[in-house]
Amino acid sequence: MGATGAITDVAGIRIGHVQKSDGGWLSGVTVILPPPGTVGSVDVRGGGPATHETDSLDPTTLSQTVDAVVLTGGSAFGLAAAGGAMRWCEENGRGFPVPGGLVPIVPAAAIFDLGRGGDFSARPGEAMGYAATAAAAAQPEGHDVERGNVGAGTGAAIGRGAYKGGVGTASITLDNGVVVAALAVVNALGLPFDTSPLRVEPAADGPNVPVTAPKEPPPLNTTLVVVATDAVLDKADCKRTASAAHAGLARALAPSHTLADGDTVFALATGAVALDRSTPTARQVSLITLQSAAADVVRLAILDGISRAEAVTTAAGTLGAYGR
């Protein structure tokens, strides 16, 4: 584990949270602000994603770097928060150069928390996105990250809405000194894997069946993850890292990647530490080791987010803190 056990163990990464939990609100925004020149990609696996600018992270597209990543509440409405992060980046000289100025590359993804505070129209917008980006920029290097019901995790819930989810983070330092870390916003249909009432167990005879079959339409859910490393990776490497990291999500939550989840993993590489690419075999081993660690750290970040959540009262009733 790194110095703080957080995504900010990757040098240059800063996190900003802004949230509101009164006056009908129970939502917020979390911004991951990487150092300039950070390369990134994404893998969207959920059946109900709410995302913005993820196409630009495909390895075959023109832009190579990511200026910020926005995680937000408010479902598709909350994606407007990305506009605030873009405005902050433009004002501070971050973006893809085009004739006459800069266009910041700011992908975003949202969880569904609409109405949990009582007011369906209370959701993040541009102002909250700008404030969260400014809050990230104001943080010192290597700062600890606030976890639980903050930022995009303010209105998060798990277990078909029965328990609180939230923001969690974790980090791992590999033997070669490379740091691999993750931040997760856990708003899942499922529960931690070994306790889920929806898990499938072998039947004595006949097909396997869920221990408890769902009787009502599931709520809309999403787990959002940002994996960060200080390794030198290109966009294709980041894409494969994001794909591999989804295994950690599946290890942590059952079920995952359902039709009602918008599960999305971003991968960022700051490029401070070179991997061993001296031979084809060395390159394979380096990448496989890093990507395996990405899956491990995502699982840890998700469980951290669940364990840090506090019980809150919403318009629909009280959401308990899971496992307490």
Image (spheres, helix red, strand yellow):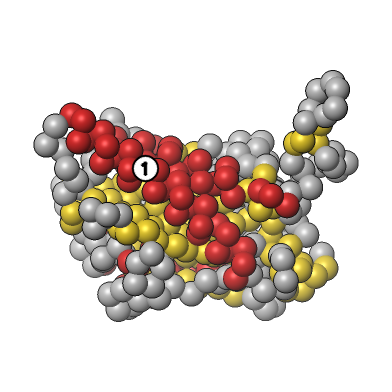
Q: Residues within 10 Å of mark 1 (few under 14, many from 20)?
A: many
- Residue lying at the far front in this picture: please name it: 204
| Residue visible at 34% across and 55% down in the picture | 180
Q: Residue sitting at 23 percent across and 53 percent down?
A: 176
Query: Based on the displayed image, in which of its 4 quarters is residue 155 positioned?
Result: bottom right
Determine whether 184 is above or below 24 in the image. above
The quarter of the picture where residue 14 lies is: bottom left
Taking depth in this image into account, of 160 and 120 the one nearest to the observer is: 160
Q: What's the residue type where badge 1 is placed? A: Gln
Is 151 displayed left or right of 173 in the figure? right
In this orientation, does residue 3 appear?
yes
Residue bearing the label numbered 1? 291
Residue 121 position, x and y percent, is 67, 62
- Could you say which quadrant of the image residue 318 lies in? bottom right
| Front residue of this view, candidates 22 and 236 | 236
- As rendered, which of 229 and 219 lies closer to the eye? 229
Quadrant, the C terminus: bottom right
Q: Residue drawn 68% across and 60% down? A: 157
Q: Position of residue 79 (x, y in %)?
A: 51, 54
What quarter of the picture does the N terminus occupy? bottom left
| x and y percentages locating residue 115 in the rendered image | 72, 62
Left or right, 184 with reference to 312: left
Residue 81 lies left or right of residue 153; in this view the side is left
Residue in the image at 40% along x and 52% along y: 227
Residue 121 appears in the picture as rendered = no
Percent x, y of residue 311: 72, 73
Q: Residue furthest right?
A: 215
